Image (cartoon, rainbow, N blue to C red):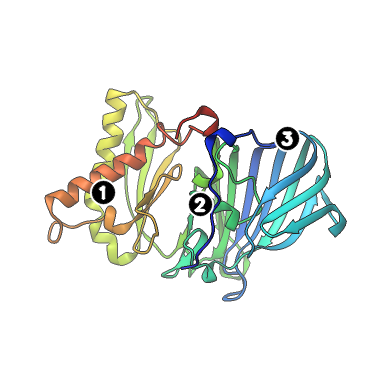
Amino acid sequence: MTQEKHKTIYRQDYVPPDYLIENVELHFELGKNPPWSGPVLQLPARMTGIGGKAVIAGWQRLVLKSVVLDGVPLGADRYAVDGETLTITDVSMSFILEIETEIRPQENTSLEGLYKSSGNFCTQCEAEGFRKITYFLDRPDVMARYTTTIVADKARYPVLLSNGNLVASGDLEGGRHFASWDDPFRKPCYLFALVAGDLSCVEDKFVTCSGRTIALQIYVQQHNLSKCDHAMRSLKRLCNGTKRSMAVNMIWNTYMIFAADDFNFGAMENKGLNIFNSKYVLARPETATDADFQAIEEVIGHEYFHNWTGNRITCATGSA
């Protein structure tokens, strides 16, 4: 794995961001020219702030393809890339910025940002992994609404997932297909999630306190399909228990879990699309102990409750 230097940031040094981002539209072209070309990411983001210049964090291995400001492509005299920073000059207090980058997830061995492992694409954006995907204000107090479109070869990557609700999908020319996801609730970019691959799904449902039917889905590689039953029962107990005790209402139409054998974290609370290392969420009675089953229920509950006790709290509140 690559070794990276991280700067310590203290709470007493906190200052609000120069810009806030209202809406983010992401477009991923996965494996368009394998294996050398990764996804092309287009980022039309509406930003509001102080005006003058915008300084945006990135990663040294990003390949910047184009910068468009309010529909006008910028020349090299209007922006500068210095190490991990993109600086755009002469910006107004409100503007739409489109950034196109090229990344190579199949070469990303940090297991942060977007990477490819065991034939599947997956993300891990906490704490600062999103800047390995595109230039962005990658900090937890910049919360925006996200729409994500994923395009990929349908035979190799039949499942395309992201945060929120599936709003469109379909086939494209050349054996490719797409899926568009909309997350109507603001989130920091470290909670962004993307999963694409040849995956199997175990599905169930529950009814909220307001009468809405929510789909519950656990996605796994085919060889793990027989290990999902306890995880699904645990998730249903949590959903029904919070409905009765807290009158908590689910904010999406679908609640998803993806379990990967080679996920770098134990589990991650990405909104509506939790990602787990499979050893922390999958088990079968023949090989698991009572303690294993209890631990699975606990970790599913931990990530589930982040939706109300963590994902909406930022640096500005002094909480974590």
Going from the N terminus, do you reach mark 1 or mark 3 first?
Answer: 3
Quarter residue 105 falls in: bottom right
Crowd band around label 2 with a 10 angstrom C-alpha radius: few (<14), some (14–19), many (20+):
many
Position of residue 204 measured from the top left corner of the image (x, y, whole percent) = 31, 45
Identify the element where label 2 is drawn. loop
Look at the numbered discs 3 and 2 and tell me whether their residues touch, using CB distance below 8 Å. Answer: no
Identify residue type, mark 2: Cys
Crowd band around label 1 with a 10 angstrom C-alpha radius: few (<14), some (14–19), many (20+):
many
Identify residue type, mark 3: Thr
Position of residue 275 measured from the top left corner of the image (x, y, whole percent) = 40, 52
Q: Along the horizontal axis of the image, is 27 left or right of 262?
A: right
Quarter residue 5 falls in: bottom right
For label 1, the residue is: 231
The residues tagged by marks 1 and 2 sit, at their Cα atoms, a distance apart of: 24 Å
Q: Residue at x 66, y 57 (%)?
A: 84
The residues tagged by marks 1 and 3 sit, at their Cα atoms, a distance apart of: 42 Å
Q: Along the horizontal axis of the image, is 289 left or right of 156?
A: left
Q: Residue at x 26, y 54 (%)?
A: 228
The circle drawn on residue 48 is 3
Going from the N terminus, do you reach mark 1 or mark 2 first?
Answer: 2
Look at the numbered discs 1 and 2 and tell me whether their residues touch, using CB distance below 8 Å. Answer: no
- Comparing marks 1 and 3, which lies closer to the viewer? 3
For label 2, the residue is: 125
Identify residue type, mark 1: Ala
